[in-house]
Image (cartoon, coloured by chain):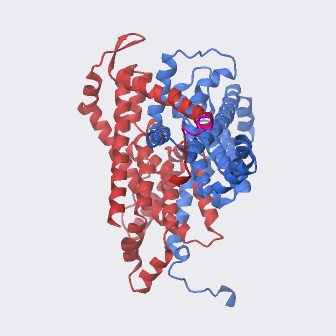
Chain colours: A red, B blue
């Protein structure tokens, strides 16, 4: 491939014609806005609509106070839990799609992709509707409760007291469930891509030689599909860590995540420099996660 | 009973195992049940969303007569259309640049180009809020120029996706075709138009659909860049959901879900299921 590349110096005019617009756009509408945020994070409020960039580290100091640090850690824990649940639900689904008959596979894939393409807000709203105190989730639980109560009377015990609808929304549980709901397709698609690339004869060989399904999964499938699994984990973990909409709509006051705190600095609290510092801490956290991933990947490559 | 005689389940036929089918079925149920219920209840003749009271189209009528909702929808589609066109051009150029040339700091530029995909939406939204405030971007322009700030923000996070999709398509291009065209006297531009562009076409279609959906879907970045007069559909639905849950939201959402399905069907028709799956 490298041999086919043209040196930009020998083709200055076509290079300028091709590279000019995207590079200009990237500089003007991405790097400069990011740079301004970065500068603001070292600034302080000098007036009602005036921010002085004084080089202070006060914002970062405040951001690492326990109040904010705990929200950061909590967001990370929630994102990790969501990723884990998505992996547990998604892995068998990805396996099923990989080994489905050619007739079924495209439709199963489409079944996963359609929600992926559907508006995030609408999906969140649909879930909220279901989980309200009068929603179907509560009705289903109520029916189960009554069933249990009826079973108790059958064996001669006291029936349970009448079902009272539970508050499913506006708590940590709702946030985790909502994030899993939203991010599940993010996990299944890269998992499928990784599993599809596997040499299936290796799995057959392992099964023929007497290893069970679970052992084959652990010793053959997981190590070979490792990079793909890691990619799926990152694709789920990173947006879940920065999630704003789900905790905002489905969470209660105690289930706010870091993105909600950042938003508050810009809308209600009107403390832009502090919000900028929090934003950059979130970006640094992403960079660390990505660096960890590429380190693992390189290590894996060396080992082979 | 020969009709029901089944071949034994082969070791790799995981999809024929009952628990596996159950698992996939349950997952699909989890993914689709909320959306289906939302769509069904948009036809429900009741102010409260819970009990079925009979079929009605009145909430569609209401949604259609809700001027601010319609305006938000028109805004969203306009932004998505504009963002798609610009992202397509910028993304295709960026893909060709990375695929074709050797230039200094290539790795760094490539990395920077993937940043808008990686950086959390909230941070990008904040960056645009500060940026447009800092350069005091005019907010009182006539339609559709008042959508320019949102459109610019959308292009920034859409075009790297287009670049990614188009570039993976370019990997399969045979450079000898290009050389042959030049040997036969085609100019740089003719070669691009007649040789490279047709090869890029599937990637461009996939990229365009991706950009359109991403733009239509975006809430967080728009929320930070939109002013009081520039409401997009997700921002409008958000304020409606916050304010009160009405069947009108269901009706509007159903329209958008159907639009998504139509777009997916178009993509299917153009490319086939497999190609769409691979573009993600």
| Figure quadrant of residue A242 | top left
Residue at far top of view: A47
Give the residue drawn at x 48%, y 17%. Answer: B134
Residue A299 visible in this rendered orientation of the protein: yes
Looking at the image, is A255 positioned above or below residue B13?
Answer: above
At 41% from the left and 81% from the top, the residue drawn is A206
Where's residue A125, x and y in %? 55, 41
Q: Is residue B238 left or right of residue A247?
A: right
Which quadrant would residue B159 be assigned to in this image?
top right
Quadrant of the image occupied by residue A43:
top left
Q: Residue at x 52, y 66 (%)?
A: A196
Return the residue found at the far bottom: B2
Number of marks drawn: 0
Give whichever of A115, B136 is nearer the camera. B136
- Give the residues in magenta: A9-15
Residue A55 versus residue A304 in the image, above or below = above
Magenta segment includes B40: no
User: In the image, residue A9 lies at what x, y percent?
Assistant: 54, 38
Residue B84: % across, % down: 65, 38
> Can residue A257 be seen in this snapshot?
no
Q: Is residue A92 left or right of residue A122?
A: left
Where is A180 relative to A197, above or below?
A: above
């Amino acid at each position: 491939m490298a041999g086919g590349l043209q040196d930009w110096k020998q083709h200055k005019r076509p290079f300028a014609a091709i590279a000019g617009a995207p590079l200009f756009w990237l500089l003007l509408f991405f790097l400069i806005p990011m740079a301004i945020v970065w500068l603001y994070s070292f600034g302080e409020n000098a007036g009602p609509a005036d921010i002085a960039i004084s080089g202070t580290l006060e914002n970062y100091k405040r951001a690492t106070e326990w109040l904010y640090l705990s929200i950061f850690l909590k967001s990370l824990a929630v994102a990790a839990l969501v990723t884990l649940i998505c992996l547990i639900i998604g892995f068998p689904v990805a396996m099923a799609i990989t080994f489905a008959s050619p007739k079924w596979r495209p439709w199963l894939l489409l079944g996963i992709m359609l929600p992926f393409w559907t508006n995030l807000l609408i999906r969140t709203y649909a879930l909220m509707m279901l989980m309200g105190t009068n929603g179907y989730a509560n009705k289903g639980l109520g029916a189960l409760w009554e069933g249990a109560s009826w079973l108790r009377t059958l064996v001669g015990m006291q029936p349970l007291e009448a079902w009272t609808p539970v508050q499913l929304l506006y708590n940590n549980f709702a946030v985790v469930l909502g994030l899993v709901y939203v991010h599940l397709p993010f996990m299944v698609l890269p998992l499928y891509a990784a599993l599809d690339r596997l040499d299936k004869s290796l799995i057959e060989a392992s099964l023929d030689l007497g290893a069970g399904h679970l052992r084959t999964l652990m010793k053959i499938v997981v190590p070979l599909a490792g990079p793909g699994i890691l990619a799926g984990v990152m694709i789920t973990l990173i947006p879940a860590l920065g999630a704003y909409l789900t905790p905002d709509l489905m969470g209660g006051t105690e289930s706010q995540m870091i993105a909600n705190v950042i938003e508050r600095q810009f809308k209600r609290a009107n403390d832009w420099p502090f919000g900028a510092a929090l934003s950059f801490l979130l970006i640094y956290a992403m960079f660390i996660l990505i660096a960890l991933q590429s380190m693992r990947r390189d290590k894996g490559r060396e080992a082979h | 009973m020969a009709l029901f005689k089944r071949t034994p389940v082969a070791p790799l036929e995981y999809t024929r195992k009952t628990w596996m089918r159950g698992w996939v079925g349950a997952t699909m149920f989890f993914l689709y049940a909320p959306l289906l219920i939302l769509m069904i209840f948009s036809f429900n003749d009741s102010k409260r969303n819970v009990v079925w009271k009979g079929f009605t189209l009145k909430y569609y009528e209401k949604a259609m007569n809700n001027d601010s909702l319609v305006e938000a929808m028109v805004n969203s589609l306009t932004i998505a259309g504009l963002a798609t066109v610009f992202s397509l051009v910028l993304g295709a150029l960026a893909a060709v640049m990375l695929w074709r040339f050797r230039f200094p700091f290539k790795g760094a530029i490539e990395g920077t180009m993937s940043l808008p995909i990686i950086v959390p939406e909230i941070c990008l939204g904040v960056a645009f809020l500060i940026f447009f405030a800092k350069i005091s971007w005019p907010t009182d322009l006539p339609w559709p120029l008042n959508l320019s700030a949102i459109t610019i923000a959308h292009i920034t996070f859409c075009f790297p996706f287009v670049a990614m999709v188009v570039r993976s398509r370019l990997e399969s291009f045979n450079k000898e075709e290009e050389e042959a065209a030049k040997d036969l006297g085609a100019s740089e531009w003719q070669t691009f138009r007649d040789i490279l562009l047709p090869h890029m076409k599937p990637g461009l279609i996939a990229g365009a659909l991706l950009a359109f959906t991403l733009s239509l879907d975006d809430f967080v970045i728009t929320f930070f860049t939109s002013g009081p007069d520039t409401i997009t559909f997700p921002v409008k639905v958000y304020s409606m959901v916050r304010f009160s849950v009405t069947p009108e939201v269901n009706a509007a959402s159903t329209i958008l879900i159907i639009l998504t399905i139509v777009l997916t069907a178009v993509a299917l028709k153009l490319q086939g299921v497999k190609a769409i799956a691979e573009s993600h």
